[in-house]
């Protein structure tokens, strides 16, 4: 088994704004990130994709159709073609000034203020592998340029992308996203890149799983806890971090719980 990072001392649970404060603002935009931090979040989770000219931008979807910006994949569009796309009106007209954020812009503005959980959104299709390698390299280079290693974690559902990130820069903390608990935990873990944490769907979260992760030196995060029942269950399991679309609400809820 690859050596694992030792688990930090247990303290307050880290509150993470899932795509920023995405319940009250257009997801993955500066206004959502600002609101999450103003509400007391410790960290921001966000999604990264690559444009045709090799720029890493913050966006969950492979294209901008959901936001009114067209169906052409981001991987086939140049950054200059994307700069004027309105990323906020789909949520509310009062956010019409929001634009795509690049990774460089994100790191400059937010890395000094919060931990950033950078989720790599892998591409599929005949050129998917090539795009994914470029995304990994561009992300690693951007973090190094910003000297932000201690302020970021790199997340992905695809362990092979995390392995590529580890190959490019072993200093980066890696977080594997999981929809469910792996079977035969120890043997599964031995096949993974050197992980810092596992981020698991709250519906699959159990205290024995969290304890298994902690014994192996892994932290555990969970998404997305937006009500008291989900948050309390996550707390009872012993997780280290909770992602929420409502980070300000979660901060208040934990204060009421004395956490």
Image: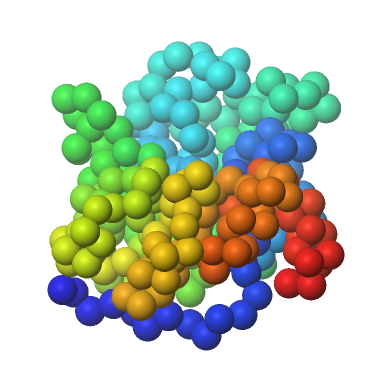
Q: What percent of the width, then of the height, locates residue 200?
A: 44, 52
Residue 147 percent across, percent down from the top left: 46, 71
The one of 199 and 210 positioned closer to us in this rendering: 210
Q: Tell me if I can see residue 8 in this picture.
A: yes
- Position of residue 209 measured from the top left corner of the image (x, y, whole percent): 40, 62
Name the colouring of the figure.
rainbow
Q: Quadrant of residue 55?
A: top left
Q: Is residue 76 left or right of residue 21?
A: left
Q: Residue at x 61, y 80 (%)?
A: 11
Q: Residue at x 45, y 14 (%)?
A: 71
Question: Observer-nearest residue: 23 or 228?
Answer: 228
251 versus 213 height, above or below: above
Against 243, is 217 above or below? below
Q: Quadrant of residue 140?
A: bottom left
Image coords of residue 106 (percent x, y) = 57, 53
User: Which image quarter is the N terminus in?
Assistant: bottom left
- Which quadrant is home to the C terminus? bottom right
* Total count of labels: 0
93 left or right of 58? right
Q: Is residue 246 left or right of residue 210?
A: right
- Which residue appears at 59% of the width and 58% of the height? 234
At 39% across and 50% down in the image, what residue appears?
A: 177
User: Does residue 137 appear in this view?
Assistant: no
Q: Nearer the viewer, residue 145 or 42?
A: 42
Does residue 247 sit above or below 172 in this rendering?
above
């Amino acid at each position: 088994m690859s050596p694992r990072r030792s688990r930090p001392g247990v303290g307050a649970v880290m509150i993470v704004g899932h795509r920023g404060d995405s319940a009250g603002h257009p997801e993955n935009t500066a206004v959502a990130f600002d609101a999450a931090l103003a509400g007391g979040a410790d960290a921001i989770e966000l999604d990264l994709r690559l444009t045709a000219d090799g720029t890493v931008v913050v966006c969950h979807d492979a294209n901008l159709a959901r936001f009114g910006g067209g169906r052409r994949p981001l991987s086939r569009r140049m950054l200059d073609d994307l700069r004027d796309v309105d990323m906020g009106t789909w949520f509310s007209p009062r956010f019409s000034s929001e634009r795509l954020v690049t990774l460089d812009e994100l790191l400059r503005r937010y890395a000094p203020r919060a931990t950033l959980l950078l989720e790599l959104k892998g591409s599929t299709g005949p050129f998917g592998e090539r795009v994914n390698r470029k995304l990994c390299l561009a992300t690693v280079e951007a973090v190094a340029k910003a000297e932000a290693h201690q302020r970021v974690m790199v997340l992905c559902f695809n362990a092979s992308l995390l392995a590529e990130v580890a190959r490019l820069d072993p200093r980066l903390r890696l977080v594997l996203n999981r929809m469910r608990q792996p079977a035969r935990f120890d043997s599964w873990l031995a096949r993974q890149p050197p992980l810092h944490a596992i981020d698991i769907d709250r519906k699959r979260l159990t205290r024995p799983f969290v304890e298994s992760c902690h014994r192996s030196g892994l932290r555990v995060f969970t998404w997305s806890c937006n009500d008291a029942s989900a948050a309390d269950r996550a707390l009872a399991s012993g997780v280290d971090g909770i992602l929420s679309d409502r980070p300000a609400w979660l901060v208040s809820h934990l204060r009421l719980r004395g956490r």
